[in-house]
Image: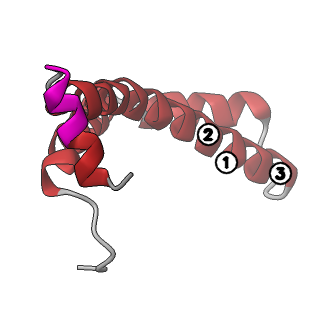
Amino acid sequence: MEVNEEIDALKTLGISPMEFLVLPRMIALVIMMPLLCIYADLMGILGGLIVGVGMLDLGLIEYLNRTREALTLTVLGLGSFTVLFLASWWPFRGVSGDAM
């Protein structure tokens, strides 16, 4: 079966292809993008900790204090807004093989 035939089969069964195929992916994208952003942020902080303490001879407490000072509510809010914007905008743009 080709993709067009599968979509026609869904329509024949009375199932909306948009709700059946697109909506679950949209929901997963909106849920997972912020979680992946938090994970990437934590891994970046951990990597900075390893480099700062291991190679640059910073103290652990000094690194944690400087990291806490750098992470303001504005920075966290801007990152969260960007992730939610991309999660809601990307599916409508579509994914293409072009770089631009």
Q: Can residue 93 be seen in this view?
A: yes
Q: Give the range drawn in magenta.
A: 8-14
Could you tell me which residue is drawn at 51 percent across and 27 percent down?
68
Q: Is the residue 81 above or below the residue 48 in the image?
A: above
Q: Which amino acid does label 1 sit on?
A: Gly
The residue carrying mark 1 is: 48
Q: Is disc 3 in contact with disc 2, using a CB cutoff of under 8 Å?
A: no
Give the x, y percent position of residue 71.
Answer: 42, 32
Q: Which mark sits nearer the N-terminus, 1 or 3?
A: 1
Q: Which mark sits nearer the N-terminus, 3 or 2?
A: 2
Q: Is disc 1 in contact with disc 2, using a CB cutoff of under 8 Å?
A: yes
**Secondary structure type for disc 1:** helix
Tag count:
3
Could you tell me which residue is drawn at 67 percent across and 37 percent down?
63
Q: Quadrant of residue 46?
A: top right
**Left or right: 33 in relation to 46:** left
Q: Quadrant of residue 99?
A: bottom left
Q: What residue type is labelled 3?
A: Asp
**Mark drawn on residue 57:** 3
Cα distance between the residues tagged 1 and 3: 12 Å
Cα distance between the residues tagged 3 and 2: 16 Å
**Secondary structure type for disc 3:** loop
The residue carrying mark 2 is: 45
